[in-house]
Amino acid sequence: MGSSIALRVYFRQKEYELVKQRYLEGGVDVVAAEIESVLGVVSHNWARCLQVCKSFRDTAENFDIKELERGFLDLDNSKFQQIAHLRISSLLQSQVVWNTFQSAMAYASSANAMITKEMPEAMRLRCTTGRIAVSHGSMADTMLVNLQELHNDGFRYTPLIRELHALSRMLEAEKLKLKAVAQFSTRPEVQHLIERLRTAFPDQENYS
């Protein structure tokens, strides 16, 4: 009898660990880490471009164009983590995280291209050719406004990160069985999480 109980406890614990490994460590945590990493690179490059624009404005004709090649990080936004997303979609019975993640990755790609390529190239052309007649100050002021708009747009994805961490806490707080996973999406707290994401991103077709 004692060995039978011990065996059941053992297999139950292995089941808990499997659920945690598959849906938390191999799902939610992977996606959260990826989006935080990608947006973190964009944020770093934004800060660097801001610094360069101010130097371009303040030093004018004495601006060192070598600054345009320094301090930027490479962005790798090719990791869409599809297996992790399949697990999250299965857990939530919703594409809300996947759709919003794709939107965030598209923002990161577009914003980073402007920050690390387009703006530095415009400054380089101003310094090395006669193709741009606008003053350093006027040009820098326009770029600084654009940078602030890009920065504000990035904060739009904060709710996604916040809700992923909330989902992570739910999975950490309870030892789920595989059978319970099928009903996880029907829980009120999970439905509320999904609805918060849909409210935060109304322009996304997140209702599938």
Image: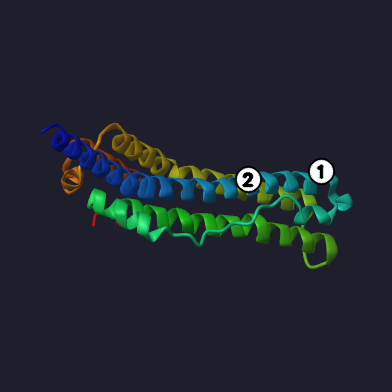
Q: Position of residue 44 (x, y in %)?
A: 63, 45
Return the disc, 2 or 1, that comes first in the chain's sequence.
2
For the N terminus, which image quadrant? Answer: top left
Viewer-nearest residue: 174 or 158 = 174
Q: Residues within 10 Å of mark 1 (few under 14, many from 20)?
A: some
Find disc 2 in the rendering and name its residue: 44
Residue 162 vertical position relative to residue 119 in the rendered view, above or below? above
Could one spot residue 111 in this view of the protein?
yes
Quarter of the rendering occupied by the C terminus = bottom left
Q: Residue lying at the far right in this picture: please name it.
A: 62
Quadrant of residue 55 within the rendered picture: top right
Q: Is residue 2 left or right of residue 189?
A: left
- Tell me: 39 left or right of 17: right
Is label 1 in a helix, a strand or a loop?
helix
Instruction: Determine the image quadrant of residue 95.
Output: bottom left
What residue sits 69% from the left and 46% below the top?
A: 48
Question: Picture quarter containing residue 81?
Answer: bottom left
Query: Relative to 56, is 87 on the left or the right?
Result: left
Identity, as a three-letter code, of the amino acid under mark 2: His
Residue in the picture at 38% in, 60% down: 82
Q: Amino acid at mark 1?
A: Asp
Disc 2 vs disc 1: which is toward the camera?
2
* Residue 178 percent across, percent down from the top left: 20, 47
Rendering coords of residue 114 (x, y %): 62, 58
Foreground residue among 149 and 120: 120
Residue 169 left/right relative to 111: left
| Residue on which disc 1 sits | 58
Kindly tell me whether residue 203 is visible in this rendering: no
Pointer 2 local density, CA inside 10 Å: few below 14, some 14–19, many at least 20: some
Q: Position of residue 179 (x, y in %)?
A: 16, 47
Spatial CA span between label 2 and label 1: 21 Å
Q: Residue at x 73, y 49 (%)?
A: 71
